[in-house]
Amino acid sequence: MPSRLEEVGKDLTAGTMAGIAQLLVGHPFDTVKVKLQSQMAGLIPGQTPKYNGALDAVRKILATEGPKGLYRGVGAPLATVALFNAVLFTARGQMEAILLHNKQPYTPLSIPQQMVAGAGAGIAVTFVACPTELVKCRLQAQSSSGNDGNEGLPTSNITVLEQQNNPELGAAQMITDDGARSNIGLRTMVEPHDIALILHENNVDDPPEEATTTNLEALESQRHQDLQAPDPPQPRSVAHVQKLKGCFAVAEHIFRHEGGMIGFFRGMIPTFLREVFGNAAYFGSYQGMKQLFSRGSHGSPLSMGSLLLAGGVAGAIFWAFVYPADVIKSMIQVDDYQHPKYTGTLDAFRKVFKEQGLRGFYCGFGPAMIRSFVANAVCFLVYELVRKGLK
């Protein structure tokens, strides 16, 4: 029994160190992925997204936030990496014990058994992954909708103070901004010197009196139409675009304003789908790759390169298999809590498909695939090195 516990401790130590290395290498790619995913939740039809692709996102993040912007939200997964690995390895170990009941110790699992064990571990780890992902995504997505949360709005560029100090700007803005309405500063009537100001800006000198009267009537009519017109469509805001500094601030905000502990499990269903089916594909493909490489090894242990390649391929298969669920998870978790765009997982799937088609489910797919291969290769490298060092 002590030897068994010692081995479990070594596995957890190596797994935790590997998880930290994986996180530090892969988090910049994950930040780009989440920003590309989350910006779609706040768009209205016809609105231009902030980022045109992965490279454009990296360039803009570095320009506005510097390198630290790529590590926004890293605190939450970094703080829970030990817990995550403990749950993952323990659950998988229990699944393996169940599947190998009454069989010889250390009997390797078959590929289908690896998939079942991975799915079982995915069920358990979902309860750790969902709150962690929620806090991480909120921090990563904070700047996706702009500094003030109103990027892309067709609002007037005349400030409240300017309109109060110079009333003429209110009327001029009403007809010179392509029908866009200023929310304040509109007067009850349009006066002739307003027309003179506008015509002067358009290089029209000394209009005849009848033209002035005609323009006055037109302006007054336009004003009434604008006042009766519905407000322009507002883009749905990404949840909590106000800057919340750090994981604890985000967690406190969620606890206080989004339903207490239940609020941390927003996006639970797509997280469940991602972890269960993703880990089944991950462990099954990893075992399959190891079996493939071992055919030419003549019973000798696999080389470090073979293990790295097997881990990288398994990581890529994980994301290729469940990426649409991850997109839906991110969109639900960064959606506005007070005025949500999505009422649930099925509603999110339906709306994403209606608005963007199949490509909407693969937004940010490139960074995710690069991250999955590189990060998992580093993860297995560190795991093997630490595990050997603990022998």
Image: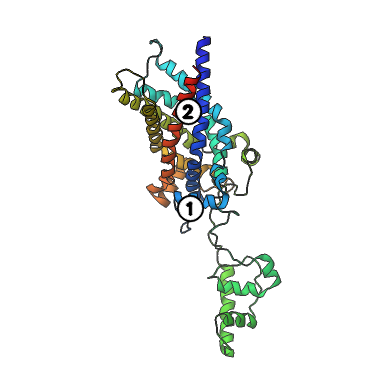
Q: Is residue 288 left or right of residue 342?
A: left
Q: Which residue is mark 1?
A: 51
Q: Which numbered dot is residue 277?
A: none
Residue 3, position in %: x, y? Answer: 51, 11
The residue that appears at 53% across and 50% down in the rendered structure is 62
Q: Nearer the viewer, residue 37 or 209?
A: 37
Density class for disc 2 (Cα within 10 Å; few <14, some 14-19, many ≥20) is: many
Q: Tell me: 372 left or right of 165.
A: left
Q: State the residue at coordinates (57%, 44%).
A: 68
Q: Amino acid at mark 2?
A: Val
Of 246 and 112, the residue lying toward us: 246
Q: For residue 132, which quarter of the picture?
A: top right
137 to 106, vertically: above or below: below
Q: Residue at x 62, y 74 (%)?
A: 171
Res 312 → quadrant: top left
| Amino acid type of the residue that numbered disc 1 sits on in the rendered structure | Tyr
CA gap, disc 1 and disc 2: 34 Å
Secondary structure beneath dot 2 equals: helix
Q: Is residue 339 above or below residue 272?
A: below
Asked whether the viewer can see residue 144, the reply is no
Residue 105 visible in image = yes
Helix, strand or loop for disc 1: loop
Q: Position of residue 153 (x, y in %)?
A: 55, 60
Tell which residue pokes out farthest to the right in this image.
165
263 or 79: nearer the viewer: 79
Location of residue 346 with respect to 116 vertically, above or below: below
Q: Give the vertical position of 125 relative to 181 (above or below).
A: above
Q: Write down the residue under mark 2.
A: 382
Please tell me how many numbered marks the rendered image carries: 2
* Badge 1 density bin: few <14, some 14–19, many ≥20, Cα 10 Å: some
